[in-house]
Every structure is written in structure tokens, then in C-alpha cells.
């Protein structure tokens, strides 16, 4: 069974290999690359910036044929008023292998065509949703890490039966998936995802009339591919085919 692991963005050395974009009415942040000692991170949303949207998009890392995937990210929120963020697993056939893709609705809902989105709203409480191609779940309450403290997020996708993808999401109180875990989704079944063979990651956030600070760091992705036939199986199939031809 093939597998792969990639560090998508650590934001060191000037930011790393990713693309970012700004939408809606707010201007671009003056200093999106923040530093604390030797560590750099991306300042996705800024408290006091109303009606702003910010995107970080990672080019495809070769996820074709995936059977399971695990996305991880460190995050820190403070001054939380509105509106939230989302993680999108963007279908490459629909949205291309790279580039910033604007959401179909609010950034914190992560609604994209033919793609999986997991949204984390922070307005009027903290509620999460998961969706595929606009088919969206109901609200599920979740807890952010403590105000101003680094925590982390992990989202796992597993292909199930009948074109389903099972989504599990956990929020951790510490960076690097450490500390106490808060389960957000546990094997939530999304239907009809058979055509999403290859995907790439995009993180999007928005501030509306109110706002928040949101920093992200250490984006990573681990994938497992579909099982490949062993050499002995290939030889066995070849012998069966030869034997069938001899009997004709």
C-alpha cells in the first residue's frame, strides 16, 4: 500500500511554497508573516479588520488514488468575535493543481464545487460544519484552544463504502496534536465523493462586521493510497490467464 507524508507549509525562510490571496473589502494585512524567536507563522486574520477574507493555498502534492488522508495544522486565536475559518480539500480536476480558489459562500463554511470543506465558525458561539459539493451537515459545537494560546487541528478522511468519505476532526489544546483533544466530527459520512481522486489543501478565513486574530503554522498532510497488487498476485494472475488460453 503506497503512502506519503508532506510538510505543506512551516512559513520559515520567507514563507515557503504556497500562495495567498485577499478578498472582500479589507486591504491586505501589513505583516502577514509573524515571528516569535526562531519561529515564523502566518497571520491569517487580524482583529480590527472588518469584512476581510484571507486564503492560503498549497499546490497539489500528488494525492491521486488516496484511500485515507490526515491533515494537521497548528493554530492560535485571540480576540474572537467573528467569523471563522475553514479547511478545504479541493478537487484538482475541478480547481486545478495550484492557485487560490474563492469559496462559493462565506470563507468559514468552506463550500467549494466537487470538494470537501470543514468549516469552523466563531460568530454567535463556535460551531463546525462539514460539506461536499454544497451538501452541508448541521452545526456541531466545538472548543477553540485558550485565547492567545497555540493549539492544533487534525482532520482525517477515509474512503468508505458506496462512494462515501468518512470525516473525523479533532481540536487539541496544544500544538502538534498535543494536550486535551476535543472531538468535533467522528466518522461523519459524506456521500457521492467517488470522483475526487486528487485534492489539494486550502485554508480560508473571514472577518465580518466583527473580527478576530488567527495565526496558523505547521500545515502537514499524510496520505495512504489504494492497495497495489503484490508481485506474487501479478504472477498468479498471469499464470491463470496463460492456463485459460491453453484450455481453449
Image (cartoon, helix red, strand yellow):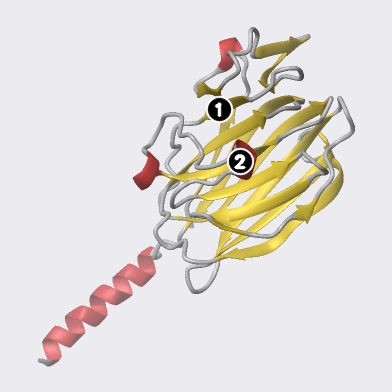
The spot of residue 13 in percent (x, y) is 59, 11
User: For the residues marked 1 and 2, what is the alpha-carbon distance in whole angstroms?
Assistant: 10 Å
In the rendered image, the residue lying farthest to the left is: 248
In the rendered image, the residue lying farthest to the front is: 209
Where residue 85 sits, quadrant-wise, is top right
Where residue 199 sits, quadrant-wise, is top left
Q: Which residue does the numbered mark 2 point to in the structure image?
A: 87
- Left or right side of 58 for 29: right
Q: Is residue 40 above or below residue 63?
A: above
The spot of residue 213 in percent (x, y) is 76, 23
> Helix or strand or loop: what does disc 2 sit on?
strand
Q: Which residue does the numbered mark 1 point to in the structure image?
A: 56
User: 129 or 182, which lies in front?
Assistant: 129
User: 121 or 202, which lies in front?
Assistant: 121
Q: Earlier in the sequence, mark 1 or mark 2?
A: 1
The spot of residue 195 in percent (x, y) is 39, 59
Amino acid at each position: 500500500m503506497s503512502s506519503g507524508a508532506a510538510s505543506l507549509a512551516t512559513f520559515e525562510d520567507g514563507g515557503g511554497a504556497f500562495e495567498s490571496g485577499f478578498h472582500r473589502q479589507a486591504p491586505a494585512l501589513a505583516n502577514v508573516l509573524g515571528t516569535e524567536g526562531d519561529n515564523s507563522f502566518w497571520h491569517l486574520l487580524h482583529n480590527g479588520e472588518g469584512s476581510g477574507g484571507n486564503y492560503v493555498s498549497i499546490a497539489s502534492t500528488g494525492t491521486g488514488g488516496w484511500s485515507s488522508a490526515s491533515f494537521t495544522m497548528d493554530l492560535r486565536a485571540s480576540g474572537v468575535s467573528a467569523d471563522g475559518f475553514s479547511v478545504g480539500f479541493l478537487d484538482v480536476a475541478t480547481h486545478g493543481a495550484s492557485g487560490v480558489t474563492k469559496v462559493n459562500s462565506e470563507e468559514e463554511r468552506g463550500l467549494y464545487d466537487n470538494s470537501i470543506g470543514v468549516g469552523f465558525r466563531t460568530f454567535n458561539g463556535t460551531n463546525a460544519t462539514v460539506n461536499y459539493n454544497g451538501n452541508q451537515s448541521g452545526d456541531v459545537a466545538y472548543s477553540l484552544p485558550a485565547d492567545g494560546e497555540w493549539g492544533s487541528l487534525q482532520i482525517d478522511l477515509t474512503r468508505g463504502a458506496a462512494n462515501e468519505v468518512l470525516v473525523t476532526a479533532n481540536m487539541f489544546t496544544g500544538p502538534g496534536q498535543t494536550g486535551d483533544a476535543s472531538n468535533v466530527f467522528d466518522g461523519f459520512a459524506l456521500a457521492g465523493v467517488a470522483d475526487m481522486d486528487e485534492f489539494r489543501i486550502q485554508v480560508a478565513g473571514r472577518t465580518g462586521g466583527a473580527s478576530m486574530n488567527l495565526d496558523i503554522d505547521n500545515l502537514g498532510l499524510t496520505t495512504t493510497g489504494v492497495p497495489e497488487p503484490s508481485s506474487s498476485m501479478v504472477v498468479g494472475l498471469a499464470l491463470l490467464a496463460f492456463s485459460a488460453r491453453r484450455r481453449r
